[in-house]
Image (spheres, rainbow, N blue to C red):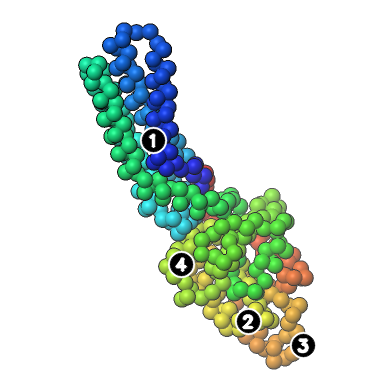
């Protein structure tokens, strides 16, 4: 989300009042009766100051898209990162200030025009006091938007037209290695709240279809029971994107987690991503000699038999990668709500 630079109240007022003085100075050079010129100078100061401050507020309001019109993923991302309600409240406060300044501009311009010349300056000072009061009332809202700008600066760029595959599995099962293996370039690493390294996004094209592969280290790699409410919301945000889940088992168990724990994690992920197809990969076949050891073969087979259409791969050597592409070629986009909208 491209939030423009957010000024402080002092910066807003300084710019508005300086521009007001400059406009007034230019008015002094115009030819008109003296008793009218004095009033016109003060009127111009008030009108210009209001308009300059209003223009800056309007620029902020115009550049921040309506949150409710964003795709669900971005709405959830904003809510997780800074809070949707707080964002709406702060934008509403700026809109309130814009309306009040518009009314002050109209009221005090009229008062100055109707007032005797000797009272024009007093009305101008009174107007500036009211303007300053309004702008200072939105200080906390300007501060919040500046905070939001900093925290939303690295929001991931999502391709909502691409078929999106979300990778899941315990740490060190080979997710990052696989991501680099099946995408055409080094994955983009972008900020994602409550992950350890930031969201990783890779892309590739096959048969004129674009694919987007997403890995979230620190999120989809531990039991749901250990997640807090905010992390659960972050997972739901991904649910709005996923057209399929690529769940990776480490059949060698060198990741430090037994296959039983890995299967339990899979079950928890499937509960959250209801209706999303899952592709099961048993990775690190290069490290497992299970086919040569009957006991290991029976052990691995016990878990393989609980799943359908399992693929055996080695992300590090590339073995079995072509079969992954064949499976992904059959994945169709799920019509997620508002996924067609972008900004």
Q: Are marks 3 and 4 in contact (CB under 8 Å)?
A: no
Q: Quadrant of residue 202?
A: bottom right
Disc 2 target residue: 256
Instruction: Please identify, in this view, whether the residue under mark 3 or under mark 2 is nearer the observer.
Output: 2
Question: Which mark is first along the chain, 2 or 3?
Answer: 2
Mark 1 lies on a secondary structure that is helix
Disc 3 target residue: 292
Q: CA distance from mark 4 to mark 2?
A: 24 Å
Q: Which residue is painted at 61% across and 83% down in the image?
A: 258
Instruction: Please identify, in this view, whether the residue under mark 4 or under mark 1 is nearer the observer.
Output: 1
Is residue 137 visible from the viewing direction of this image? yes
Q: Which residue is painted at 41% across and 55% down in the image?
A: 83
Q: Which residue is painted at 44% across and 65% down in the image?
A: 230
Mark 2 lies on a secondary structure that is loop
Q: Are marks 1 and 3 in contact (CB under 8 Å)?
A: no
Q: CA distance from mark 3 to mark 2?
A: 22 Å
Instruction: Please identify, in this view, whether the residue under mark 3 or under mark 4 is nearer the observer.
Output: 4
Question: Which mark is first along the chain, 4 or 3?
Answer: 4
256 shown above or below 104: below
87 shown above or below 99: below
Residue 298: mark: none
Crowd tier of the residue under label 1, counting other residues whose Cα lies within 10 Å: few below 14, some 14–19, many 20 or above = many
Is residue 110 visible from the viewing direction of this image? no
Crowd tier of the residue under label 4, counting other residues whose Cα lies within 10 Å: few below 14, some 14–19, many 20 or above = some
Q: Position of residue 217 (x, y in %)?
A: 59, 67
Disc 1 target residue: 13
Q: Nearer the viewer, residue 171 or 43?
A: 43
Disc 4 target residue: 232
């Amino acid at each position: 989300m491209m939030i423009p630079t957010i000024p402080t109240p002092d910066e807003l007022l300084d710019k508005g009042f300086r521009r007001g003085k400059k406009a007034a100075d230019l008015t002094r050079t115009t030819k008109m009766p003296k008793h009218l010129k004095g009033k016109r100078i003060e009127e111009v100061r008030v009108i210009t100051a209001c308009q300059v401050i209003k223009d800056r507020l309007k620029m902020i309001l115009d550049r921040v898209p309506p949150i409710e019109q964003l795709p669900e993923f971005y709405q959830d991302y904003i809510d997780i990162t800074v809070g949707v309600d707080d964002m709406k409240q702060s934008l509403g406060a700026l809109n309130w200030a814009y309306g009040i300044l518009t009314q002050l501009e109209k009221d005090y311009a009229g008062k100055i025009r109707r007032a005797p010349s000797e009272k024009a300056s007093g009305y101008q000072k009174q107007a500036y006091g009211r303007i300053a009061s309004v702008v200072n009332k939105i200080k906390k809202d300007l501060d919040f938007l500046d905070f939001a700008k900093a925290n939303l600066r690295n929001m991931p760029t999502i391709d909502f037209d691409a078929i999106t595959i979300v990778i899941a599995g315990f740490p060190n099962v080979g997710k990052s290695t696989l991501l680099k293996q099946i995408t055409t370039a080094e994955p983009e690493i972008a900020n994602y709240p409550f992950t350890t390294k930031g969201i990783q996004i890779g892309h590739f094209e096959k048969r004129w279809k674009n694919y987007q592969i997403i890995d979230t280290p620190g999120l989809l790699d531990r039991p749901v029971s250990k997640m807090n409410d905010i992390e659960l919301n972050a997972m739901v945000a991904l649910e709005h994107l996923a057209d399929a889940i690529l769940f990776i088992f480490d059949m060698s168990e060198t990741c430090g987690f037994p296959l039983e724990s890995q299967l339990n994690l899979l079950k928890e992920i499937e509960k959250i991503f209801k209706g999303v197809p899952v592709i099961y990969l048993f990775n690190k076949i290069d490290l497992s000699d299970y086919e040569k050891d009957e006991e290991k073969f029976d052990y691995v087979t016990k878990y393989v038999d609980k799943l359908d259409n399992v693929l055996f791969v080695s992300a590090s050597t590339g073995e079995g990668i072509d079969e992954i592409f064949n499976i992904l070629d059959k994945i169709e986009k799920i019509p997620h709500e508002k996924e067609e909208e972008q900004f």
